Image (cartoon, rainbow, N blue to C red):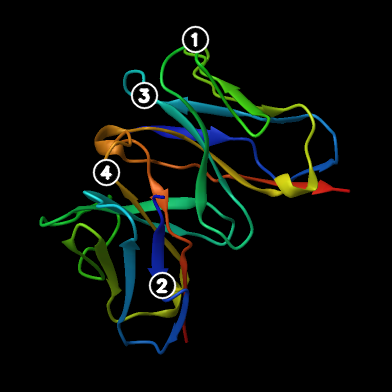
């Protein structure tokens, strides 16, 4: 149980275009979803926290107008990278928490999405 | 906010060697402490956790003890296998269940 999927697993887009990444909790309802960015030397940075039905909370230094997050339902959150540039190329990972019967501090991670901006 | 310092990797060991990955943290209060593992090409998985001081978390032969006095949560395994090759992340739980992961430590185990 507690599976989180991401789609697509990898995407290539042209500079200036926007790309949307989906994060789904497949077998539980996630009250909270988190988005992370993983840099080349593996360090993982928390970008934002989203709760279903409310605006995402962004970490300091993360541009909320560039990284749009929508948590439309208890099983789906999306991250849209707007006007992407090559420096946005990275590995984006989501996680979800709030599964029934599971402590709220436990997060279940998706497999990640590799974004390459050309 | 909470933060963590992990030993820099990569750590390269031979199979059956003893493993220690150091982790120290700064946090407000006494948070739960976690180790996550990321196998090649996969997402992060919870490896073990400890929710209060002196607790020992254990899983798959890995152990870590919550040391409040030294603010540490070092990961150990007595005999590593090739299949343990992965990136290991230490993290204190934070407010609103946020995790502020460190840089992670890459472990390479050679046969």
Residue occupying the point 62% across, 25% down: B63
Question: Mark 4 sits on what residue?
Answer: A98
For the residue labelled by badge 4, is the local secondary structure a helix, a strand or a loop?
A: loop
Question: Mark 1 sits on what residue?
Answer: B69
Q: Do the residues bearing badges 3 and 2 touch, measured as CB atoms within 8 Å?
A: no
For the residue labelled by badge 1, is the local secondary structure a helix, a strand or a loop?
A: loop
Mark 2 Cα shell of 10 Å, populated few (<14), some (14-19), many (≥20): some
Please, is residue A116 above or below residue A58 in the view?
below
The answer, for residue B6, to whether it is visible in the render is yes
Same chain check for tags 4 and 1: no
- Report the mark closest to the observer, 3 or 2: 3
Q: Do the residues bearing badges 2 and 4 touch, measured as CB atoms within 8 Å?
A: no
- Mark 4 and mark 3: span between their CA atoms? 18 Å
Same chain check for tags 2 and 4: yes
- Report the mark closest to the observer, 4 or 1: 4
Q: Do the residues bearing badges 3 and 1 touch, measured as CB atoms within 8 Å?
A: no
Chain of the residue that carries numbered disc 4 in the rendered image: A
Question: Mark 2 sits on what residue?
Answer: A88
Chain of the residue that carries numbered disc 3 in the rendered image: B
């Amino acid at each position: 149980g507690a599976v989180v999927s991401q789609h697509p697993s990898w995407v290539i887009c042209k500079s200036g275009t926007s790309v949307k990444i989906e994060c789904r909790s497949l077998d539980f309802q996630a009250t909270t979803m988190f988005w992370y960015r993983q840099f080349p030397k593996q360090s993982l940075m928390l970008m934002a926290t989203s709760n279903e039905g409310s605006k995402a909370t962004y970490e300091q230094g993360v541009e909320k107008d560039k990284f749009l997050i929508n948590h439309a339902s208890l099983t789906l959150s999306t991250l849209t990278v707007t006007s992407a540039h090559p420096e946005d190329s990275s590995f984006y990972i989501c996680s979800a928490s709030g599964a029934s019967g599971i402590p709220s501090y436990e997060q279940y991670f998706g497999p990640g999405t590799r974004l390459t901006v050309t | 906010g909470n933060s963590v310092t992990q030993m820099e990797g990569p750590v390269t060991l031979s199979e059956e060697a003893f493993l220690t990955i150091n982790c120290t943290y700064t946090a407000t209060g006494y948070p739960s402490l976690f180790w996550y593992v990321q196998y090649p090409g996969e997402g992060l998985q919870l490896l073990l956790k400890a929710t209060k001081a002196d607790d020992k978390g254990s899983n798959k032969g890995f152990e870590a003890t919550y040391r409040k006095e030294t603010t540490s949560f070092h990961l150990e395994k007595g005999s590593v296998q090739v299949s343990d090759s992965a990136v290991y992340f230490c993290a204190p739980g934070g407010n609103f269940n946020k995790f502020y992961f460190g840089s992670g430590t890459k472990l390479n185990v050679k046969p």
